[in-house]
Every structure is written in C-alpha cells, then in structure tokens.
Image (cartoon, grey):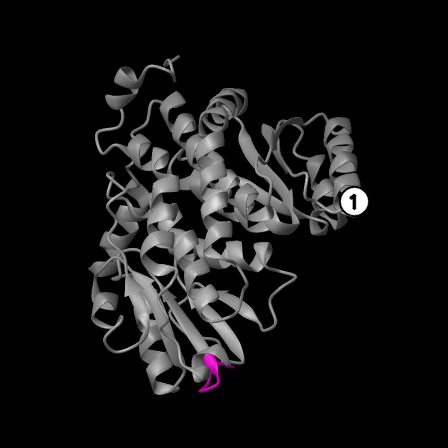
Amino acid sequence: MIDLTNREALAALDPKNVYGSTEMFADQCQQIIDDHFDIELYTDAYKNSANIVLCGMGGSAYGGYIAQSLFHDELQRPLMVNSDYHLPGFVNEQSLVLLSSYSGSTEEPLSCAEEAKVRKANITGFSSGGALAKLFPTQYPGFIFEPKHNPSGQPRLGTGYMSMGTIALLRQLGVISITKEEAQAAVQEVRANQEATKQQAMAIAQQIQQTIPVMFAAEHLGGNVHILRNQMNETAKSFAAYGELPELNHHFMEGLKYPQDKKLTVIFINSSHYSAHLQKRMALTKEVVSKNNIAWVEYQAAGSTKLAQMLNVLSFGGYLSLFEAFIYGLDPSLIPWVDYFKEQLRQ
C-alpha cells in the first residue's frame, strides 16, 4: 500500500497538484473574504427579492447546499439550488437568480441566465472567467475572482472559492448576517486544525477502503454530506451515498438489511453544536447501524462555531477523497467519464 505520508511518492500520482489545491482551501476562503466581502453592489430591488434561485452544477453548487443548511434558521425567504438548464416556473421579476460557475462557461447556468433575462429577474453571480465574466460586474452586480490558490486548475478543487463566494453574495444581499471578523475567525480555526484534520482523514481513508462510504450528518452540516458524496465520486472514483438526520431515521435504516453481502462503511459527521434532539438521534443511529452489522467510523467536526465546523468538514472531505484516490493508485485530477460524457454531448 502507498505511504500516504510520503509526499514524493504521492506526487507521482498527482501531476496536477490536487494535493496542493486541497491544502489551500483556507487560502481560497480568505481570498474571498479579503477581496469581495466589503463590496456594496446591490440595489433595494435585489435585497428585497421574494426568492433566491442559485444556478450551479457540481462543485459550483456547493455554496447553495451549504447556505441552506448552515443558515436554515436565519433564512427569511426561500433559497433553492437549481442544477438544470431551465429555471423553475415561479421565477419572475420578483426573483433573484444567482449564477454560480467556477469556470463561467458551464452551459446549464448560462442557459438559466438567458431565461432570467427574459423573465426580467434580478441577476447576480460570480465566477473566475468565461462567459459570466462578461456579465459581472459590468451588466449585472457580481464579481470575478482570480483562482490563484488552486494550482490544479480543477474547478471542483475550488471549494473555498465557491462556498465562501456564495456566503459573500448572500451577505451583501442582506439574506444572512455574518461579519467579516466572524468569517476570518472561522478560517483561522480551519488553519489551526488543518494538520489534525489531515491526519484524521488519512486514518479514515484507510478504514473505508474497498467499501462504499455512506455519510450521515444533521442540521448545519447537512449540506456537507452532499458535498462529501460528490468529492468521493469525483476525486476518489468511489461510489458513495449520504443521508441527513432526522429524515434518514424514517426510512434509511430499514434499507441496511439487504443485500447481505453489501460492503458499506457509515461515516458519522458529528458536532458539538447539534441540538439535544439530534445528538440523541445520532447516538441511536450508531446503535442501529451496529445492530445491522455495518461498520462505521466517526468524524467530529472541529471548530467553536457552526461556520468554523462547516468549513472544517469541507476541508476534511477534500483530504478524505484525496487520500482514498491515492490508496486506489489513482490520479485524483482525472474525471474520465465526465470528460467522455461532455465530449459525446458536443458531437
């Protein structure tokens, strides 16, 4: 088995330096805070929009999943993630369409942009370039970031940009309340815990190898397990699944019996900030998983605030999927089936 502590050996599998991008997660977040947290871009029409539809695909939708969970109790208007070519039917001139694309050239959000114009919706968004760079901030309020802390060049490794970028826009819109100081403090905690996070991810990657990882989380970390599933798919080339408590307690556990030759490992993402109800549910869910003879491991989110814990779990997911790819002897940058699919679509 490859030595996960041997950076020289890992570099042979990692010509595009995915490891480097994973290490720079906190730098990506801090760059957004420094460059885009204090820019006032919005009119009253934007701030008073009746609903918000975030249009993004894959890693570019991460910020939407994060916001829905992290700010669940704070959101005063509907926030929907739309990963499709078309906007939902309710979008009109009272709606705000947030276009999120790392590359700025993803066809689905660009299609939604054209529909949003026709429906006279308020439009905002951000990217690193592409066609969206022609929209922001000249035609519509938004921003373009320079991805200088993503040496791999892979959009899905720009997790810090996409998650913190969405938070920055929602903050400027008055949708969420978060100060620059709170965001900076959370990023500093990610940095302080980075080595411990890496070591835990390394250990868990070895425990779950050759099994199907199933991630469970709750409340403010619900969006994280959606993202962690994606990271395991794309980076580790591993089938994975996720569930959120309390919903999974009403159905998921009954699906653990068959088939009997399944190879599952449940990863419980736990938190000191879960409510008392959810902490009890988490403990009971572990018991049910054990009684079904399913292996499980636990990751305790690090951080003094919910924001810090969310960022910490994003960092953990990056490392976990990276180390799993190395264990399988894979180049973590390659996404051959996604590339094949896109090439066939172009023909």
Q: Is residue 316 above or below residue 205?
A: below
Name the foreground residue: 31 vs 321: 31
Residue highlighted by disc 1: 276
Name the foreground residue: 169 vs 56: 169
Q: Is residue 279 above or below residue 211?
A: below
Would residue 94 be counted in the magenta stretch? yes
Name the foreground residue: 292 vs 228: 228
Q: Is residue 310 above or below residue 261?
A: below
Horizontally, residue 79 falls left or right of residue 291, namely left
Q: Residue furthest front?
A: 181
Determine if residue 58 is in view: no
User: Residue 132, how many percent across, how many down?
Assistant: 25, 67
Mark 1 element type: helix
Would residue 294 be counted in the magenta stretch? no
User: Residue 285, how many percent across, how many down?
Assistant: 75, 37
Residue ID at (79%, 36%) = 284
Name which residue type carries label 1.
Ala
User: Residue 99, how many percent across, how many down?
Assistant: 36, 67
In which quadrant will I find the C terminus? Answer: bottom left
Q: Which residues are magenta?
A: 90-95
Residue ID at (46%, 85%) = 92
Q: Residues within 10 Å of mark 1 (few under 14, many from 20)?
A: few
In which quadrant will I find the N terminus? Answer: top left
Residue ID at (45%, 25%) = 195
User: Residue 123, how many percent across, how many down?
Assistant: 37, 76
